[in-house]
Amino acid sequence: MPNLEPGMTPKQKVEEIVAFYIRMYPDEWRIFCDYAKEVRSTQGVNKWAEMEGSDVIERKLGEKPEKLHALLQTFLTKEEWSWLNPDGLNNKSMQGPNWFFKRYPEMRITKDI
């Protein structure tokens, strides 16, 4: 289990959860990083995270492996989860996702944030 201490900030909790995931699933992590790198280099994602050749604008900064996503959802509070994954209704701030994908550029789909 991730070593989550009382009083940790949301960023510290996320960092601990990600470190735990990488320790537990190193092969999956490497495969995911290769996938994200390939998407960055071949999908034609511009700096605004719009996918070229699409009628739909998808402003996607990055992706998370499914197991990491589940760990984050399990161990973060509702407020922390909302900060990291704004729904556009109750939380429109991109502060959490921007921090996350700057902190973990290997999960970023865009070249820059």
Image (spheres, helix red, strand yellow):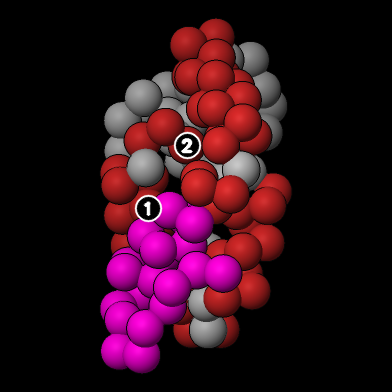
Question: Which residue has dot 1 on it?
Answer: 100
Residue 60 image point, x, y percent: 53, 40
Q: Is residue 92 left or right of residue 56?
A: left
Residue 90 image point, x, y percent: 53, 80
Residue 100 image point, x, y percent: 37, 53
Q: Secondary structure at mark 2?
A: helix
Q: Identify which residue, 80 or 21, lies in the foreground.
A: 21
Cα separation, mark 1 vs mark 2, equals: 9 Å
What residue appears at the point 50 percent right and 47 percent down from the top-left corner? Answer: 23
Question: Residues in magenta?
Answer: 1-20
Is residue 87 visible in the rendered image? The answer is no
What residue appears at the point 31 percent right and 30 percent down from the top-left corner? Answer: 112
Q: Is residue 87 left or right of residue 91?
A: right
Question: Which residue has dot 2 on it?
Answer: 107
Q: Is residue 13 magenta?
A: yes
Q: Quadrant of residue 94?
A: bottom left
Q: Is residue 28 magenta?
A: no
**How many residues crowd around disc 1 within 10 Å: few (fewer than 14), some, or many (20 or more)?**
many
